Amino acid sequence: MDATDPRASLDPATAEIRRAVRAALATVDGTVLVGLSGGADSLALAAAVAFEAPKAGVAARAVVIDHGLQEGSDQVAARAVATAQQLGLEARAVRVEVAPPTGNGGPEASARDARRSALLAAARDAGAEAVLLAHTLDDQAETVLIGLARGSGAASLGAMSPDRVEEGIRIIRPLLEVRRTQTRAACAAQGLPVWEDPHNLDRRFLRVRVRQDVMPVLEAELGPGVAEALARTSDQLREDAAAFAEMIDETIEDIVEHAEAGIAVSVAALAANPPALRHRIIRHVVASEFGVSLTRAQTLEVARLVTDWRGQGPIDLPACRAQREGARLVFAGRMPE
């Protein structure tokens, strides 16, 4: 490369992030919205989008979600908006109300749900085709580890998809092959003012403990490359999950029929399938018909009505009941107590 070429001195991390963003924008026809927090990951993404979008003929904007969970969060949001505007992106801040935590998700899940809803609403308001999020390979690896610790299934261990559709809006994560060290290096090379989120050091949060304690131990004891290996695992599991979903779509219409107050599945057809597919069909039927997710233990108990039925009675499940009726496995809604 000629020394007079401006690319000759381009920081390698900046170049890698721009390459990833360029590939993502090549799949987009309309407006994109960048989710910006002011941290290194999202700033590096916003800078790359501001550089690449005009060349790709893509309109790009940024939105900053202010959760209001920390003192001065409005000032942090305002600084992030100003930085995005300096980069050449139209930007605005949106204040959201975070609901009190419920279930096992804790405050992280509540904030994530509020952020997701606000991003999708902002995308619709902007007429955007896609929202770009700055999750990195490190985020992906941490998500897989958390799923493993919780005993999650393959679909959950597939972690974050690089490109999926939610409520008609594409959610694109261009940086899932980029390390967190690279986003920081890119921000430093471009002189971008990085906001350090205090929550990223708060050990009340599981993800912080995984980041600070678990990942360093794994790298020290197993050697480098653990994060990349976990990310590769998530890619493979997403492929497997997609294949199983296609098999279920091809199979389910032939083995399912409506039943009184519910739905019925052919026992013979379920028994003819391997356990992995049989269990997925059971979970799919319950989730589709009754809007609830079965645990592994519940799924196995229902499967025994197919493979090990000795006259046992119905099984109470969340929102429904499973019962063997001759050659059919019937799922019926439970009456409110």
Image (spheres, rainbow, N blue to C red):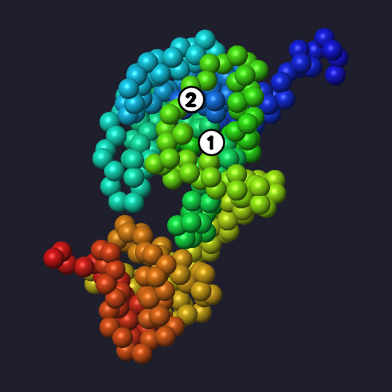
Instruction: Residue 276 in the image: state x and y as whole percent.
Output: 52, 69
Relative placement, left or right, of 309 versus 87 is left
Q: Amino acid at mark 2?
A: Glu
Q: Which residue is mark 2?
A: 196
The quarter in which the N terminus is drawn is: top right
User: Marks 1 and 2, Cα distance to the nearest angstrom?
Assistant: 16 Å
Secondary structure of residue under mark 2: loop
Q: Can the viewer see residue 229?
A: no
* Residue positioned 37% across, 33% down in the render: 115
Q: Can the viewer see residue 215?
A: yes
Q: Which mark is residue 135?
A: 1
Quadrant of the rendered structure where residue 99 is? Answer: top left
Instruction: Residue 181 in the image: state x and y as whole percent.
Output: 63, 31
Q: Earlier in the sequence, mark 1 or mark 2?
A: 1
Is the C-beta separation of discs 1 and 2 under 8 Å? no
Q: Determine crowd level at label 2: few under 14, some 14-19, many 20+ residues with C-alpha closer than 10 A.
A: few
